[in-house]
Image (cartoon, rainbow, N blue to C red):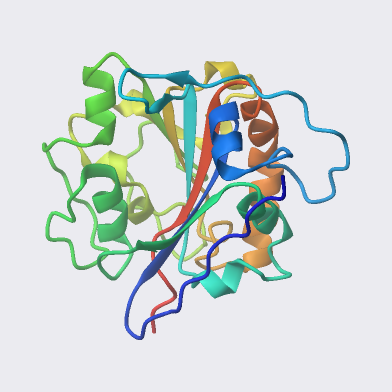
Amino acid sequence: MTPTPPLRSPVRPGRRVRRTTVAAGTSMALALLGLTAAAGAPSAQAEPSAAVPATFTASGVPKLDHVVVVMEENKFYEDVIGSSQAPYINSLAKQGASFSDFHGVVHPSQGNYVALFSGSTHGIKDDDCPHDYSSDNLGNQLLTHGKTFVGYSEDLPSDGSKDCGDDGDSGYARKHNGWVDFKNVPASSNLRMSRFPSDYSKLPDVSFVTPNLTNDMHDGTVREGDDWLRKNLDGYVQWARTHNSALVLTWDEADMP
């Protein structure tokens, strides 16, 4: 079966666009998406290994063992999908689901991160730091229901740090780390990217990954972001195919003037 190409949507003037690509490793997702190969590097030529059947809940929704959400920055859909500067991401998009009508809700970035994690911008209209909330959110819901959550941030000064970062060196920025703004998400769920396990079976049920300001395409190029993703997450993508797990890749908003 030939993979269905990702949908393209027109960019509407003044509208902030967030694009999301899902590279799933379950046989359910592979079947629904018409995939015949792993969501891996574009140069891979080997025959794909058999995928593990997905587990379904009573409602018919697939129950994944691990989900990793990677947050990228400030690019229009057309800047990435179809671009020669993003060969790895395009390989994922061709073999996964592309949510091309998925949009940011506010500008600048910080409110989008908080909204994605908690369902509300909490009135944020800037990138000021710090913010501290006690309201419900994805991490708290997972932990309350006996699941696990960890956010991994590249160049986070130390595990559990609440430092604002973003000192102009294209490193860590708290404005791109939504979970640290919530008091009911423990410090143990806020880790450096270097703590992302090489044994992927030890990943939490849900993980968020935030590259630094260069590698998330905020200050760096599409090519730099694409290379970083391949280097740091392709091992997980290949493993996920046969371990009932998925990768979600999304951007916070388009590159606004």
| Residue at image location 64% in from the left, 35% down from the top | 237
| Residue at image location 66% in from the left, 23% down from the top | 242
Please provide percent x and percent y for residue 28. Answer: 54, 30
Please provide percent x and percent y for residue 138. Answer: 27, 35
Please provide percent x and percent y for residue 235. Answer: 70, 33
The quadrant in which the C terminus is found is: bottom left
Q: Nearer the viewer, residue 20 or 108?
A: 20
Height in image: 255 above or below 46?
below
- Write down the quadrant of residue 53 in the picture: top right
Q: Nearer the viewer, residue 76 or 60?
A: 60
Image position of 55 (left or right of 256): right
Height in image: 83 above or below 152?
below
Image position of 214 (left or right of 14): right
Q: Residue furthest top?
A: 146
| Residue at image location 84% in from the left, 49% down from the top | 43
Q: Residue furthest front?
A: 1
Whether residue 26 is visible to the viewer of this picture, yes or no, is no
Whether residue 91 is visible to the viewer of this picture, yes or no, is yes
Height in image: 196 above or below 164?
above
- Write down the quadrant of residue 26 in the picture: top right
Please provide percent x and percent y for residue 186. Answer: 27, 26
Image position of 108 (left or right of 210): left
The quadrant in which the N terminus is found is: top right
Q: How many marks?
A: 0
| Residue at image location 60% in from the left, 31% down from the top | 25
Q: Nearer the viewer, residue 110 or 117?
A: 117
Height in image: 217 above or below 139?
below
